[in-house]
Image: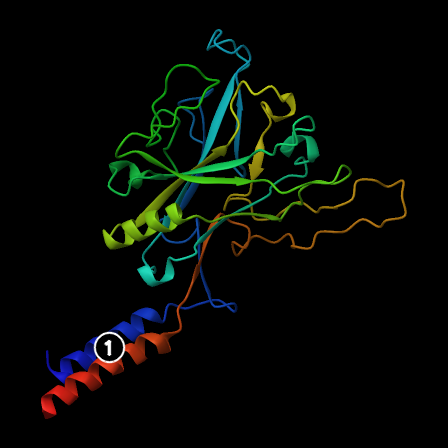
Amino acid sequence: MSVKRLGGLVAALAIGAMVTPDAHGQLIIRTRDGIGADAEVRESAPDQNRGTSTEIASRIKESVPGGDPADGGDRNSSIYLKFDLSNVSVDNVPGTTLRLTYRNTNLAQGRVQNDDTKEYTGISFYGLDVNNAGNDWSESTITYNTAPGISPDGNIGTKDYNTSAGNLIPLGTQLFPQVTPQNHLPVGGALDFSSAALDQLITDAVNAGKPSVTIVAGVSHDGDDVWNDWLNFNYLFNPKEQLTLNNDSYDADTSDDVPAVTNLFGTDNSAGAFDPQLIMTVPEPSSVVLAGMSVLGLLAHRRRR
């Protein structure tokens, strides 16, 4: 390769590395960007499309473990997220964070912590295999029966994630943070999830030239968990369709002298601040350029010899 052609390659690499970051040097991809999408699918309404809903949630309940799968009280729902990868390079992927924003004020202590065992529940995340044809799912048509990676078993109170080859890949679980008795997880607050498996999923998609990546989220506990406060409770998060968050207060106890803390996150989601999002790093372009210049220098030295 000539010095001239290599110089052109270095310039191209530098331009490719200069993905426009935000003020914090981050690349943020929201479900509203490009071909992104977010939707909830419910097994209790398996043919219902909820793509335009102003909430995305996950819940589960098996009224009678091992009992009638259609007794009317069972519930099972999951969140589907699709992110556009058109502006992503593998250099952006390491340390990616998936962020969901709390949608309601009901995430109180009993909803996230078992007071008997002191165990916490959370949200488990799965990635749809990048070669699964279902990655082209549409927000306007997806239902429980058509959701890729789900194999309905007819029992509404149990999870139906298909983790066999080519389907859903476990990415990990993010537990909810501790909540003091008189408070709750605040509207506008973030549940942030990162894992090596998440990084690998996105890297595989980028390397394969895929236009998007699909991530599925659902509560980590099971439908027959003995802690009743966790069952049939909607763990709500904000989708791109909800443009205004509720006003919020962090302190529900008005009997003491501690003033309530008002919403620290704002309420305007018109620009997507509270959409489901991937938060990535943007490497310094100088590192790419310096590496390329080193190669140019070496090639020039060899030519002089």
Find numbered disc 1 in the image and state the secondary structure of the residue it sits on. helix
Q: How is the image coloured?
A: rainbow
Q: Residue at x 20, y 83 (%)?
A: 296
Q: Say if 180 sits above or below 163 in the image.
A: below
Asked whether residue 89 appears in the rendered view, the answer is: no
Q: How would you rate the neighbour count of disc 1 (Cα within 10 Å): few for under 14, some for 14-19, many for 20 or more?
A: many
Q: Residue at x 37, y 53 (%)?
A: 34
Q: Nearer the viewer, residue 268 or 99?
A: 99
* Residue marked by disc 1: 10
Drawn side of residue 271 relative to residue 16, left or right: right
Drawn side of residue 123 relative to residue 261, left or right: left
Q: Picture quarter containing residue 280?
A: bottom left
Q: Residue at x 12, y 86 (%)?
A: 302
Q: Nearer the viewer, residue 197 or 262?
A: 197
Q: Amino acid at mark 1?
A: Val
Q: Residue furthest bottom?
A: 304
Question: If the image is split into quadrants, where does the C terminus sit?
Answer: bottom left
Residue 239 percent coordinates (x, y): 51, 43
Q: Residue at x 27, y 72 (%)?
A: 13
